[in-house]
Amino acid sequence: VRNTSNLVSFRRRDEKPPQNEDGVSSNKACKAYNSVLELVGNTPLVKLNRLPLEHGVKCEVYAKCEFINPGGSIKDRIALAMMQDARKDGVVHDQTEFVEVTSGNTGIGIALNATLMGNKCIIVTQDKNSSEKVNTMRLLGAEFDNEINPRAHYENTGEEIVAALGSVDVLVLGAGSGGTLSGVGSKLKEVNPDCKLVAAEPDGSVMINKDGNPHPFLVEGIGGSEAPIILDKSLVDHVEVVTDKESFLMARELSKKEGLLCGGSSGAAVCAAFKAAKSLNIGHGKRVVVILPDGIRNYMSKFVSDQWMEAHRFLEPPQHTMKWWTKP
Ligand code: PMP
């Protein structure tokens, strides 16, 4: 729960953030902001307390809560970085209209920035990534954002993790564009060359796991049939395949048991972290970071709904004892 008092706290640049007994920084000071865009990034890292124990995992697992971003996902970061770069380079002016082809969250990030800057934007979405989509994005000059995407995660998301936790033993995350994996992965490996990167691959995706059996899957934002250009596969040390059912059940558990109201790709990443903790023998004292890219609100009519889960056979329907009306 955030401190909502209107006090403004200043800390000198050279002053270290306060630390708790684990040596983890714990600055809860409240600040005042000039615009919602200043709230992009600096998301909290939250330790999982119940789930690792229940899943027989002994390492420390920290969730990087990207759903706290104002647009609801990790994609606010790259949208902001792209728009800032474009303004700086003079590419964007007041009449500029933005066109973005997206699987969802990037579009929200772009729309948020555009509306605050007074620009129009057109968002084109499709249910799943396709080669048509990739080709259209290329046509629209999307290679422009290729380099900014991982760079934003290297300079910000990764840097924030290092500032809060120092050296990290294992990073676990899914890959969509691969920007988070490439950016955060390189930063954490730079700080600790022994840091292991575990990729969460949806069952049916052959983006990283080339031996997989390609088929449709329902988890959104990660996986696909081809590896995007910005995905640096050389950073991946280990892949854990996670089914839709496992991902959605874990996302529901994260809400119920840890209070982390996150989406399906977050469930996939935490599930992969627990699987990797067992298969790679990541034990007591090891520090694992899992990225939770977006929140529950994108999926209210999907895995959040019991009926949807039952319809997809991810949950058993409740066994009601029928009380038949009997004639008095
Ligand atoms: N999860 C969700 C819900 C997403 O929208 C995305 C972005 N497609 C990701 C994970 C993966 O992030 P990245 O594109 O940086 O690989």
Image: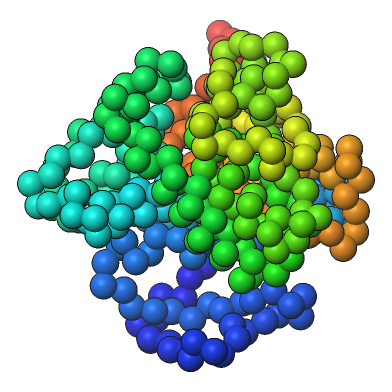
Q: Residue 139 lies in what quarter of the image?
A: top left
Q: Identify the residue shown where x is 56% and y is 21%.
A: 226
Up the image or down, 184 lies above or below 35; here it is: above
Q: Is residue 328 left or right of residue 316?
A: left
16 and 50: which is toward the camera: 16
206 and 140: which is toward the camera: 140
Tell me where residue 199 appears, x and y as whole percent: 69, 37
Rendered-image quadrant of the C terminus: top right
Q: Is residue 191 left or right of residue 89?
A: right
Q: Identify the residue shown where x is 13% and y is 44%.
A: 96
Up the image or down, 4 lies above or below 273; here it is: below
Q: Residue furthest top?
A: 327
Q: Residue furthest front?
A: 89
Tell me where residue 102 appears, x and y as whole percent: 36, 31
Tell me where residue 217 appears, x and y as whole percent: 58, 18
Q: Is residue 14 left or right of residue 269?
A: left
119 and 131: which is toward the camera: 131
Q: Residue 15 lies in what quarter of the image?
A: bottom right
Q: How many marks?
A: 0
Q: Is residue 296 left or right of residue 205?
A: left
Q: Identify the residue shown where x is 77% and y is 75%.
A: 22
Q: Identify the residue shown where x is 61% and y is 38%.
A: 232
Up the image or down, 286 lies above or below 267; here it is: below
Residue 253 visible in this rendered orientation of the protein: no
Q: Residue 279 lies in what quarter of the image?
A: top right
322 and 266: which is toward the camera: 266
Q: How is the image coloured?
A: rainbow
Tell me where residue 321 appears, x and y as whole percent: 68, 19
Residue 266 visible in this rendered orientation of the protein: yes
